[in-house]
Amino acid sequence: MPTENVKHVLVVEDEQSIRDILVELFEVDGNELVAAETLPEALEALRSKQFDLIVTDLRLGGKRDGGLQVMAMAGMVSYNATVLVLTAYPDDANRQASNRLGALHFLEKPVDLHTIATLANDAGVSTAFGESRAASEARLSAAT
């Protein structure tokens, strides 16, 4: 697959089981995936490249603002990324802070994987549930 069509995806989740499921969802042809368990890992990944999609837990390792720090860094280095925030703590203060930092979607755990896949597809990122609309349109136009 040509490099310009590769979508860069960052998954930041400290719960192993959720991270594993998200990795499975995004580990498909056309995606370059980085999975981070901790805030320092996530920040290092953000320093190394720009991402098209960032899925982050709000609380990382018990830090209330871990996900907010991920979003703040993403806003500086991956400012065009679609950011999805996952949280078990959906209070208004967290929602407003996430929105200010550029999160387009604030999703309460447990989140249906089809919801995440749909939002990813809308951002042009393919998932295990199917390719994105952009990839589908590119494939169709290349065939004609």
Image (cartoon, grey):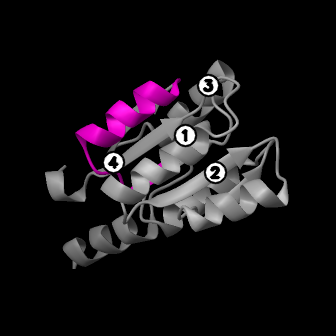
Q: Earlier in the sequence, mark 3 or mark 4?
A: 4
For the residue labelled by badge 1, is the local secondary structure a helix, a strand or a loop?
helix
53 falls in the magenta region: yes
Residue 14 is marked as: 3
Q: Is residue 86 left or right of residue 91?
A: left
From the image, tell me which residue sits under label 4.
8
From the image, tell me which residue sits under label 1.
25
Q: Earlier in the sequence, mark 4 or mark 1?
A: 4
Name which residue lies at 68% across and 53% down.
Answer: 114
Q: Earlier in the sequence, mark 3 or mark 2?
A: 3
Mark 3 is on which residue type?
A: Asp
Q: Is residue 2 visible?
A: no
**Front in this rendered view, residue 69 or 127:** 69
Work out how far the residue at label 1 is from the one at label 3, CA to CA, in angstroms. 17 Å
For the residue labelled by badge 2, is the local secondary structure a helix, a strand or a loop?
strand
36 falls in the magenta region: no
* Displayed quadrant of residue 67: top right
For the residue labelled by badge 4, is the local secondary structure a helix, a strand or a loop?
strand
Give x and y (percent) for residue 119.
Answer: 59, 62
**Front in this rendered view, residue 44 or 11:** 44
Check contact, mark 1 vs mark 2: CB within 8 A.
no
Give x and y (percent) for residue 126.
Answer: 44, 54
Give x and y (percent) for residue 49.
Answer: 25, 44
Mark 4 is on which residue type?
A: His
Q: Is residue 14 left or right of residue 126?
A: right
Q: Earlier in the sequence, mark 4 or mark 2?
A: 4
